[in-house]
Image (cartoon, grey):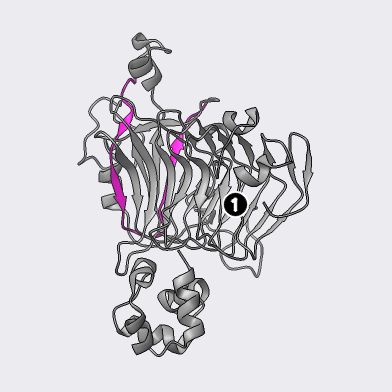
Amino acid sequence: MSHLVSWLPPNIRTPIWAPGQMGVPGSDSHEGLRVSVEGNVYYVDPNYPGATTTADGTLPTNPLSTVAAALARCLPYHGDAIAVMGNNAWGNTYGYGRAADGSLLAISEEVIVTVPGVRIVGICPSGANGVVWTPASNGGTCITVRALDTLIEGFFFDEGAFAGCNAISAVWNGTTAWGDNLTVRNCVFSDTVDTGIQLDFSFYVNIYHCAFWDCDAYGIYNDPAANPAEFCDIHDNIFHDCALGAIKAQDMANSHIYRNSVYNGVAQSGAACTDLGFDFITGNDNQVFENYFSCALAVVFADFNSASPTDAWIHNMTMTGETITNP
Amino acid sequence: MIRDKIIYMLTNHFGVSEEAAKKLKAAGIDNAPKMRTATVKQLKDAGLKQAEIDKVKGKK
């Protein structure tokens, strides 16, 4: 999905529009239009010769070796971005690529984002699925978001050399640190990932253009024993055969979920598949529309999904027709 | 977010009044798991009416 990353704000200094316009202060700035006044771009590339955690990091030729080191440089709402360079982990861990091509190190870290307003971007110049990111321990969480306004895009999450992986967790710390206003887009969650994105008391979360391929647990998960996620915008994702459910967010409220493709082999076969699709049963006021489910309209759709009494499920499609009622 | 997020969650998800939500929060019942395990006495002490208590108990 990294081919969908649009590398523009927050830091690009575009050339000036014109030699300047009389009467318009700033139009002739030699620094051009600056989307962010103070922000820096920190480059991370563990494969670059000599990369360290103490490098300057603001030049691609003097990059930092870890995302954690880059996060430590970021300041709240400074407009900082972390550009994580592509790697050839495919040639290392998986054997699909060629080891001789080098750049074999994946990002193998478990970071906690505590600085608000940071953009973390996987940069791949090609059609790659994303910059490969694995945890650093069995079952570890790659990115825990405990700050507002974080943007994550362009990564391919995988367990790598470890057993089990939770990719992104936007989880309230129980006091004053929230993972609200998170955007996750253009990311791939591999078939070795347990849970793609976990939410807890996360409001205003945007998740789009992501693919959750055969995740071992959930694509998106909000623990029923935790706090509800609300005001989420979840659209244009692929949920393919997530073993325990595509979206299990029973307390989800005031959210819109649309244009997602949801395949599940059990549902497709017509067998019992209780809540392996979308489960919002104890939430409220969600609008769920134009999603495609790999199940029959009669009986299976209502087994595959659960709606809250105040949800509105509109124009969702199944293998045997359009649904016009809540499941 | 302009409002108190915990107060909002208690009112929206559990259907209690804002006044009761403030009392609950002050009593330390300040998240969904605590609401789910709160005793009827705790809810009554926070000023919840019986209908509100029933609604809370009906929520997972």
Q: Is residue A259 above or below residue A1?
A: below
Question: Element type at marker 1?
Answer: loop
Q: Residue A207's x, y, as percent? A: 54, 49
Q: Is residue A108 left or right of residue A233?
A: left
Q: Nearer the viewer, residue A160 or A313?
A: A313
Q: Quadrant of the N terminus of chain A?
A: top right
Q: Is residue A306 above or below residue B54?
A: above
Mark count:
1
* Quadrant housing residue A115: bottom left
Residue B2 appears anywhere in the view: no
Q: Numbered disc 1: what chain? A: A
Q: Is residue A325 above or below residue B53?
A: above
Q: Residue A106's x, y, as percent? A: 33, 27
Q: Residue A5's x, y, as percent? A: 55, 39
Q: Is residue B3 left or right of residue A66?
A: right
Q: Residue A23's x, y, as percent? A: 65, 70
Q: Is residue A293 above or below residue A125?
A: below
Instruction: Specify few, some or many for label 1: CA neighbours under 10 Å numbering under 14, 14-19, or 20 or more.
Output: many
Magenta span contains residue A35: no
Q: Measuring 58% from the left and 28% from the top, which residue is drawn there?
A: A265
* Quadrant housing residue A61: top left
Q: Nearer the viewer, residue A94 or A26?
A: A94
Magenta span contains residue A118: yes
Q: Measuring 62% from the left and 61% from the top, which residue is drawn there?
A: A286
User: Which amino acid, by three-letter code, is at mark 1?
Assistant: Ser
Query: Start and end of the magenta stretch?
Result: A103-125
* Quadrant housing residue A49: top left
Residue A311 appears anywhere in the view: yes
Instruction: Report which residue position mark 1 lands on.
Output: A306
